[in-house]
Image (tube, rainbow, N blue to C red):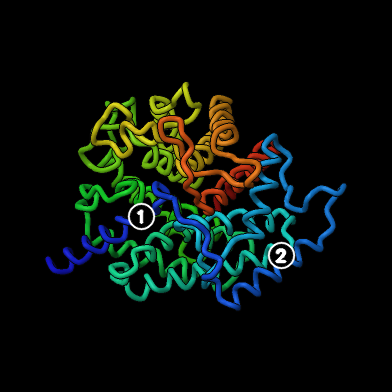
């Protein structure tokens, strides 16, 4: 038993040590990596989209109507025409493309606005995710030699959930369930110990809250079919464990600690927790979950910087907090925050959450977006824009901008409870 526990600890530390790695998003595209098949797929997708007629002569990549229209057009065009894939894996990403490219394009499909070329493109991504997730399912300890397998699987399962929600593709559920079963087995083996391991870059609470959120999206995507009841119980149980192990009502108001025993405010663990809590409220109608989500959101205001207009990743005054002293504000953290705030706005009707989402989008627009390059860089430190680029973070931003149109149109961001 001890040997198994030790192996699992090594597995988690190794996997999360390289992490989502948005915090060091400095990789550059490697066009030479694409194999002939994936390059052909990309070329075919490009040709199909380019041939489409666009209304009024506007670029076919302009698909939103809100005030961030120019950003969406240029970033989407760059991602769609210049992404490089090897076995479905984006060469310039750290796991997020597997989640948020499918989330965007399958949502387009669900609303009747995806082209055949876009659907061909997204299936390149989902096929790549299936390969990565299956490697983890078959041998969880394979992450010792390739830690990105867990990162890709953990983040990307949401993309497959969104895909099943839109298409009911029968090839998706076995991979989704296989990943959840493997991940939950590891968490069960580690037990409470996982909460004391300060796994970089985001800590265990972020991993667990993200897993809870995905588990709780399962019954929404599957509409009560297959293993929906089981997945809901598992997601709610993880939220209960998080509350027991990491809830703190002293620091910054109310917040989930990045790991058990810390004493600083941290963005990532809390914005991912909000997303899980809102889904729990959606499924159960229990006001406790929504109240908790609102208290967490209000506590995050201690991280807001009036000087820069965005949310610091962590408490600048605490020397043990990740990025402390760097005045670090990231696209990844901003994205998760925007989505959490839009969810809260829809569930509560409180305009303050929409206002906060707008000001965070304004930060991205004014500070991280470079129009001439058609991309958003990853972060600022001490007010200086870094040259780090994460394509998946840009996909996530586009997904948020699509959802903003839905919010403004009164379209619900989450499916109804089954």
Q: Is residue 160 above or below residue 318?
A: below
**Do we see residue 310 in this rendering?**
yes
**Do we see residue 348 in this rendering?**
no
Is residue 54 shown left or right of residue 230? right
Residue sitting nearer the eye, 416 or 372: 372
State the residue position of label 1: 19
Is residue 54 shown left or right of residue 264? right
State the residue position of label 2: 46
Residue at screen point 34% across, 64% down: 147
Q: Check disc 2 and report its element: helix, strand or loop.
A: helix
Q: Position of residue 203 (x, y in %)?
A: 30, 47
Quadrant showing the N terminus: bottom left
Is residue 207 shown left or right of residue 75? left
Could you classify mark 1 by the number of other residues whose Cα lies within 10 Å: few (under 14), some (14-19), or many (20 or more)?
A: many
Kindly give the residue lying farthest to the right in the view shown.
56
Residue at screen point 13% across, 69% down: 3
Q: Position of residue 172 (x, y in %)?
A: 53, 69
Q: Check disc 1 and report its element: helix, strand or loop.
A: loop
Q: Are marks 2 and 1 in contact (CB under 8 Å)?
A: no
What distance separates the C-alpha of mark 2 from that of mark 1?
31 Å
Residue at screen point 43% across, 45% down: 276
Q: Is residue 202 above or below residue 312?
A: below
Q: Is residue 117 above or below residue 322?
A: below
């Amino acid at each position: 038993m001890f040997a198994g526990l030790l192996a699992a600890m090594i597995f988690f530390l190794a996997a999360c040590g390289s992490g989502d790695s948005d915090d060091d998003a400095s990789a550059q595209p490697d066009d030479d990596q694409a194999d002939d098949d994936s390059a052909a797929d990309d070329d075919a997708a490009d040709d199909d989209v380019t041939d489409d007629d666009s209304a009024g002569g506007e670029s076919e990549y302009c698909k939103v109507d809100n005030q961030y229209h120019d950003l969406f057009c240029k970033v989407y065009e760059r991602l769609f025409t210049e992404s490089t894939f090897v076995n479905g894996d984006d060469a310039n990403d750290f796991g997020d493309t597997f989640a948020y490219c499918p989330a965007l394009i399958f949502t387009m499909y669900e609303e009747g606005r995806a082209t055949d070329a876009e659907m061909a493109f997204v299936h390149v991504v989902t096929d790549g995710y299936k390969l990565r997730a299956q490697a983890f399912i078959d041998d969880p300890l394979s992450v010792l030699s390739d830690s990105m397998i867990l990162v890709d699987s953990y983040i990307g399962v949401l993309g497959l959930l969104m895909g099943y929600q839109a298409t009911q593709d029968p090839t998706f559920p076995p991979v989704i369930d296989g990943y959840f079963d493997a991940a939950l087995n590891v968490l069960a083996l580690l037990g409470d110990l996982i909460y004391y391991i300060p796994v970089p870059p985001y800590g265990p609470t972020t991993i667990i809250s993200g897993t809870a959120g995905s588990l709780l999206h399962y019954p929404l995507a599957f509409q009560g079919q297959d293993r929906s009841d089981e997945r809901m119980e598992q997601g709610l149980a993880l939220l209960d464990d998080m509350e027991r192990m990491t809830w703190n009502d002293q620091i910054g108001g109310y917040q989930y600690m990045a790991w058990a025993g810390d004493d600083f405010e941290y963005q990532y663990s809390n914005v991912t927790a909000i997303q899980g809590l809102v889904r729990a409220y959606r499924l159960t109608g229990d006001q406790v979950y929504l109240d908790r989500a609102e208290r967490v959101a209000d506590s995050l205001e201690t991280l807001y910087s009036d000087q820069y207009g965005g949310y610091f990743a962590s408490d600048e005054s605490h020397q043990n907090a990740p990025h402390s002293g760097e005045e670090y504000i990231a696209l990844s953290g901003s994205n998760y925050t925007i989505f959490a705030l839009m969810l809260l706005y829809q569930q509560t009707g409180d305009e303050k959450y929409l206002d906060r989402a707008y000001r965070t989008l304004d930060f991205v627009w004014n500070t991280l977006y470079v129009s001439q390059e058609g991309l958003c860089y990853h972060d600022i430190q001490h007010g200086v824009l870094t040259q780090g680029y994460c394509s998946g973070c840009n996909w996530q931003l586009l997904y948020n901008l699509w959802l903003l149109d839905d919010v403004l149109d009164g379209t619900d961001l989450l499916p109804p409870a089954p």
